[in-house]
Amino acid sequence: MGNRLERKVAIVTGGGTGIGEAICKRFAQEGARVIVAGLPDDPVEEVAREIEKQGGIAYYYKGDLSVLANAQACVELAARMYGQLDILINNAGVFPETNYMQDFTEEAFDYLIRNNIKTTFVMSKAALPELHKTQGNIVTAGSEAGHMGEPQAVPYGGTKGFNHAFTKGMASEQAQFGVRCNIVAPGPVDTAWTHASTGPMSAEMEKQTTTGTLMGRRGTPEEVANVYLFVASDEASYVTGAIYYVDGGTTIAKGPMGDKAAANLKKEPKDSLNLSHSMEGNVSVRS
Ligand SMILES: NC(=O)c1ccc[n+]([C@@H]2O[C@H](COP(=O)([O-])OP(=O)(O)OC[C@H]3O[C@@H](n4cnc5c(N)ncnc54)[C@H](O)[C@@H]3O)[C@@H](O)[C@H]2O)c1
């Protein structure tokens, strides 16, 4: 156990699966008290229990965090259980469909807007009064797709572009209240979203996704969580309005450079967080 987030309280939205599970576990390892927040059928209770088994402190919140009343209840839980809130991680998101624009369903578009955009809005709105008290910070999940666009997931890339501009806007506005706001923008990460066997990507998209990085592989949830940890900690006290790309070089790669990556870069580091839910993410429109 480390102490880089000692005495801090963090809410992680979408904390039950994928990158969110890794953020919860990594933050708890560094002394944060965590609220693992997610949809009612996400394994948030399990993640909270697993953290406690490893000696950390965690509660869970179940509810649709695109609804303001639920977002407020989640923030109230942190304030009631821990007495404060220092960090909001806007990580919740969905990747329900891949299709060319002319075929992309309106249903999946609406689902993306609700879960990728409205969650960020209502959670930030609900958390800011508490973050003003602690001079805390917000880190929002962007994506290299929010910068470059995403073929066959055009609306998804659009939602992430929204999150980039939204969070930079908050950074400019909220500095006067003592709050930093930043973005972590991953490239392809080893979760349910990037495997043809567990999400909506075709085998061809899956291959392009990894060969389009300079590393020739996906990032691991833990590699992304490590960057969230730095940005959310006091070590990043002079960082606000920034986008941290954790994308294995995707945004600067020209063509399928991953095929040429050296073996050391190509090798995924071993999972040290005992992740159990990295492949159980939100990959279809749920009612
Ligand atoms: N996996 C990648 O390759 C990748 C790349 C770039 C960015 N990201 C971003 O990282 C974040 C996590 O992605 P992941 O791959 O871990 O996916 P994931 O599906 O495993 O995790 C997202 C979690 O958010 C939850 N969620 C969605 N809507 C919610 C709502 N309204 N209320 C509460 N919880 C909600 C989901 O149910 C899920 O548990 C997303 O914001 C995504 O856009 C992921």
Image: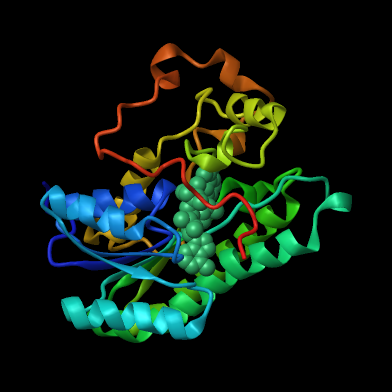
- Residue at 28 percent of width and 63 percent of height: 237
- Side (left or right) of 174 relative to 78: right
Give the image location of residue 189, x and y in percent.
49, 38
- Side (left or right) of 104 relative to 178: right
- Residue at 81 percent of width and 53 percent of height: 104
Give the image location of residue 265, x and y in percent.
42, 21
Q: Could you tell me if residue 90 is visible in this image? A: yes
- Residue at 45 percent of width and 76 percent of height: 123
The tally of labels here is: 0
How is colour applied across the structure in the image? Answer: rainbow
- Side (left or right) of 61 relative to 63: left
- State which quadrant residue 233 falls in: bottom left
Q: As drawn, which residue projects farthest toward the right?
A: 102
- Side (left or right) of 9 relative to 206: left
| Residue nearest the viewer, comparing 152 with 130 | 152
Give the image location of residue 251, x and y in percent.
60, 39
Q: Is residue 286 above or below residue 67?
A: above
Q: Could you tell me if residue 172 is visible in this image? A: no
- State which quadrant residue 268 falls in: top left
| Residue nearest the viewer, comparing 47 with 267 | 47
- State which quadrant residue 41 falls in: bottom left
Q: Is residue 195 above or below residue 268?
A: below
Q: Name the quarter where the C terminus is drawn.
A: bottom right
| Residue nearest the viewer, comparing 286 with 124 | 286
Q: Is residue 263 above or below residue 214?
A: above
Q: Is residue 269 above or below residue 158?
A: above
Give the image location of residue 225, x and y in percent.
35, 47
